């Protein structure tokens, strides 16, 4: 499985950087975003490194999408948000800050006025950990 030694998501996939894991299978991983745009913000990645939508393999893309749906369902069962977006960013202008293909599972609140490039603000790590535990119970 291809990896980039400098990539933080490859390090999370290898267990070298800690994360609040939600789901793992042979091809994909889901974990909480540490800078949540809204409560319950999670990320889904293929384990194999690819930069973006244009370079990710068909197989990894398909598997990541299936995992994103699974995680979106669990987040929805946990938080019952007003809505939920799957967001996928390609290139800095589109808000991509980590160059390892990923899908955001992003719960929405009525009138949260979230913009496409929402900016990074560190969340409450203890609260994220507790929420991860609740979401995992629905997966
Ligand atoms: P992008 O901006 O590339 O679409 O999304 C990258 C996401 O990765 C951001 O929402 C950011 O908060 C998240 N992120 C960056 N570094 C880490 C990390 O070390 N751990 C976790 N859990 N999330 C990270
Ligand atoms: Zn990577």
Image (cartoon, grey):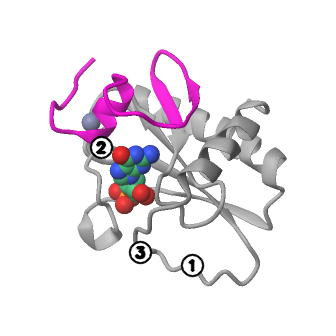
Residue 121: x and y in percent read: 44, 68
Whether residue 8 is in magenta: the answer is yes
Q: Are marks 3 and 1 in contact (CB under 8 Å)?
A: no
Of marks 2 and 3, which one's residue comes earlier in the chain? 2
- Asked if residue 102 shows in the view, the reply is no
Q: Is 135 placed above or below 116 here?
A: above
Q: Are marks 2 and 1 in contact (CB under 8 Å)?
A: no
Using the image, tell me which numbered label, if any, was put on residue 114: 1
Using the image, tell me which numbered label, if any, was put on residue 117: 3
**Which residue, as the protein is rendered here, is positioned at the far front?**
126
Q: Which residues are magenta?
A: 1-30
- Total labels drawn: 3
Which residue carries the number 2 mark? 100
Disc 1 C-beta below 8 A from ligand 1: no
User: What quarter of the picture does the C terminus occupy?
Assistant: top right
Left or right, residue 16 beside residue 123: left
| Residue sitting at x 29%, y 31% | 11
Q: Is 93 placed above or below 101 here?
A: below
Disc 2 C-beta below 8 A from ligand 2: yes
Residue closer to the observer: 135 or 87 = 135
Left or right, residue 34 beside residue 100: right
Mark 2 Cα shell of 10 Å, populated few (<14), some (14-19), many (≥20):
many
Of marks 2 and 1, which one's residue comes earlier in the chain? 2
Badge 1 marks a residue whose secondary structure is loop
- Asked if residue 6 shows in the view, the reply is yes
| Residue sitting at x 33%, y 22% | 14
Q: CA distance from mark 2 to mark 3?
A: 17 Å
Whether residue 55 is in magenta: the answer is no
Residue 119: x and y in percent read: 40, 73
């Amino acid at each position: 499985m291809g990896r980039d030694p400098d990539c933080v998501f490859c390090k999370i996939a290898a267990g070298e950087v800690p994360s609040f894991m939600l789901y793992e299978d042979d091809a994909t991983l889901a974990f909480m975003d540490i800078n949540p745009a809204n409560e319950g913000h999670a990320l889904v990645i293929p384990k194999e490194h690819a930069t973006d939508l244009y370079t990710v393999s068909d197989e990894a893309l398909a598997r990541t999408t299936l995992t994103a749906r699974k995680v979106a369902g669990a987040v929805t069962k946990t938080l019952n948000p007003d809505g939920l977006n799957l967001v996928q960013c390609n290139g800095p202008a589109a808000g991509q800050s980590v160059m390892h293909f990923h899908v955001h599972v992003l719960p929405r609140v009525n009138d949260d006025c979230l913009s496409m490039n929402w900016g990074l603000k560190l969340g409450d790590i203890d609260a994220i950990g507790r929420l991860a535990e609740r979401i995992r119970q629905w997966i």
